[in-house]
Amino acid sequence: MNPVMKNTALFTAMAVLLLLTGIVQSWNSALLILNMGLISAIMALGVNLQWGFAGLFNVGVMGFVALGGLASVLITMPPVPEAWAAGGPGVLLGLLLGAASIGIAIWAYPRLPKGRVRVLGMGAILVIGFIVYRAVFDPAVAAIEAVNPATSGYLGGLGLPVVLAWPVGGVLAAGAAWIIGKSALGLRSDYLAIATLGIAEIIIAILKNEDWLSRGVKNVIGLPRPVPNEIDLQNDPGFVSTAEGLGLDPVTASSLYVKFGYAVLFTIVLLILLWLAQKALHSPWGRMMRAIRDNETAAEAMGKDVKGRHLQVFILGSAVCGIAGAMMTTLDGQLTPGTYQPLRFTFLIWVMVIVGGSGNNLGAVLGGFLIWFLWVQVEPISGFVMDVITAGMAEDSAVRAHLLDSTAHMRLLTMGVIMLLVLRFSPRGLIPEK
């Protein structure tokens, strides 16, 4: 089949699945799956930049997604004046002192003579810097977290429009990627995977424990939205009359309107990023990246800066994941650091890339939609199947109880089976790289 026809057929089939969800289940469910599918497609696009373009095995995706979520809080939430008055200057001063101690250590390292003098000097700079930093930082944090801890207990954000949080999430993730890449990209692929996973865990642990920054496990709720609130629409006489004229309940109509608004915004972001990724793929830079991926030794012999190019694509892919993380937190309306599970969700994004087609941007997008659809729908479908299978069994049957309880585990089993089938019958993915 012609590749264009094949790609069109695959995306059409995906659209039909969403339409069937709306018809059989509800349009609210279909739009929710669509919105999360758009975000998942953006995440898969970011991972595809790193793995498909450059062969970088990053399993710390959730760390960059979490930084995007933090950006939504720092940009959109209003500042808490009482917290700033209680300890804001102290926190800023403490962070500056900590950064200054690290800067002094970096400056002093090449200037100290090798041997015991360098070891003792570096140790003294870092220990004294750490003591001074904690002496200023800790009291300020305690003062901030004591301010209405049930409702705030943190500094808040800048109170800016929510859409600005999405590119800022990309910037935060890119900054973290630069720091990680400078130290970890020289490692072999398996060590890079371990390093990125460990750093993702560190980022998420910081979000869970630094209440002054993100309220930790208390969560930040009520994030501003780029679309109207459902209750405001339900109180709008014009909207209510329009909904009733279409034969819709105002509550249902408001929910559909909000979800559709998110879908439009997310689609615009996805199309922009996909267009940029396609331009990069077919540019001389993209051809160079694939040459480095296929044979680093040959590319280095031709004068290419392999480590520098790896750092570039690592930063770009992480920035895309950060944008997706900010969008996901905006859709949820809250930041819940406890829900970021690196192994579980990183695995899911990698399945999206592998099933869709590593190295192909369209394949990554298709994989994002398809795998998220299956992730959501497998459990209700398997529940229905188990009900049919066990219909003739006795109510107290142990086999029946076991089969019904097993539906909760069908998601991971299904993802594994799909991966095995794709790797067996289409090892390069549904839309393979040319």
Image (spheres, rainbow, N blue to C red):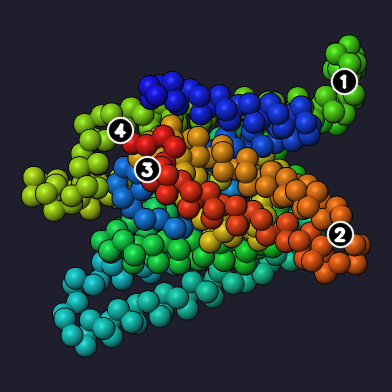
Tell me the mark number nearer the camera, choosing from 4 and 2: 2
Q: Position of residue 174 (x, y in %)?
A: 41, 47
> For the point 34% across and 65% down, which residue is it?
190
Examine the image and state in which quarter residue 182 appears.
Answer: bottom left
Q: Residues within 10 Å of mark 4 (few under 14, many from 20)?
A: few
Q: Residues within 10 Å of mark 1 (few under 14, many from 20)?
A: some
Badge 1 is on which residue?
Answer: 248
Examine the image and state in which quarter residue 412 appears.
Answer: bottom right
Q: Check contact, mark 3 vs mark 2: CB within 8 A.
A: no
**Does dot 2 land on a helix, a strand or a loop?**
loop
Examine the image and state in which quarter residue 38 appears.
Answer: top right
**Does dot 3 land on a helix, a strand or a loop?**
loop
Q: Residue furthest bottom?
A: 116
Badge 4 is on which residue?
Answer: 434
Who comes first in sequence, dot 4 or dot 2?
A: 2
The three-letter amino acid code for the residue at tag 4 is Lys
Q: Quadrant of the N terminus?
A: top left
Q: Judge left or right: residue 152 versus residue 34.
A: right
Who comes first in sequence, dot 2 or dot 1?
A: 1
User: Spatial distance from mark 2 to mark 1, Cα to Cα?
Assistant: 41 Å
Q: Is residue 327 above or below residue 271?
A: below
Q: Judge left or right: residue 244 versus residue 277.
A: right
The three-letter amino acid code for the residue at tag 3 is Arg
User: Spatial distance from mark 4 to mark 3, Cα to Cα?
Assistant: 10 Å
Badge 3 is on which residue?
Answer: 428
Badge 2 is on which residue?
Answer: 393
The answer to whether any part of residue 230 appears in the image is yes
> For the point 41% across and 74% down, which residue is it?
129
